Image: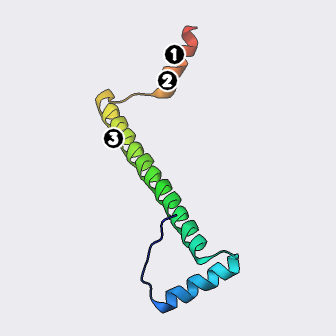
Amino acid sequence: MPKINITLPEELLRKIDKSARDERVTRSEFFRKAVQEYWEIEKREREDRGRARDIREAMRVQASLRKKAGHWDGVAEVRKWREAR
């Protein structure tokens, strides 16, 4: 497994070491878990942004269709379909 070197402020390193001890993992394992969790959070946030973008686009399309359709009573339309059966 490749090794890396990083520089951290002493206070942050103390907090990391304490958390690693509390979780009973090595410092390396602590960093591996932290990076993995960061990626999972990033993935969820990216997916959420994509869904929000899709929703905005759907709302834009609906507004455009509503504008083109003018006044339209959906309830009355459903009643007509039911009566036509």
- Vertical side of 21 occupied by 75: above or below: above
Q: Residue at x 47, y 27 (%)?
A: 74
Residue indicated by mark 1:
80
Q: Amino acid at mark 1?
A: Lys
Q: Secondary structure at mark 1?
A: helix
Who is closer to the viewer here, 63 or 80? 63
Q: Residue at x 45, y 89 (%)?
A: 9
Where residue 66 sits in the image (x, y, percent)? 35, 33
Q: Is residue 26 left or right of residue 10?
A: right
Where residue 56 sits in the image (x, y, percent)? 37, 46
Who is closer to the viewer here, 26 or 16? 26
- Vertical side of 37 occupied by 43: above or below: above
Specify the quadrant that holds the C terminus: top right
Distance, label 3 to label 2, CA atoms, is: 25 Å
Q: How many marks can you see? A: 3
Where residue 47 sits in the image (x, y, percent)? 46, 50
Where residue 52 sits in the image (x, y, percent)? 42, 49
Q: Residue at x 33, y 27 (%)?
A: 69
Residue indicated by mark 2:
76
Residue indicated by mark 3:
60
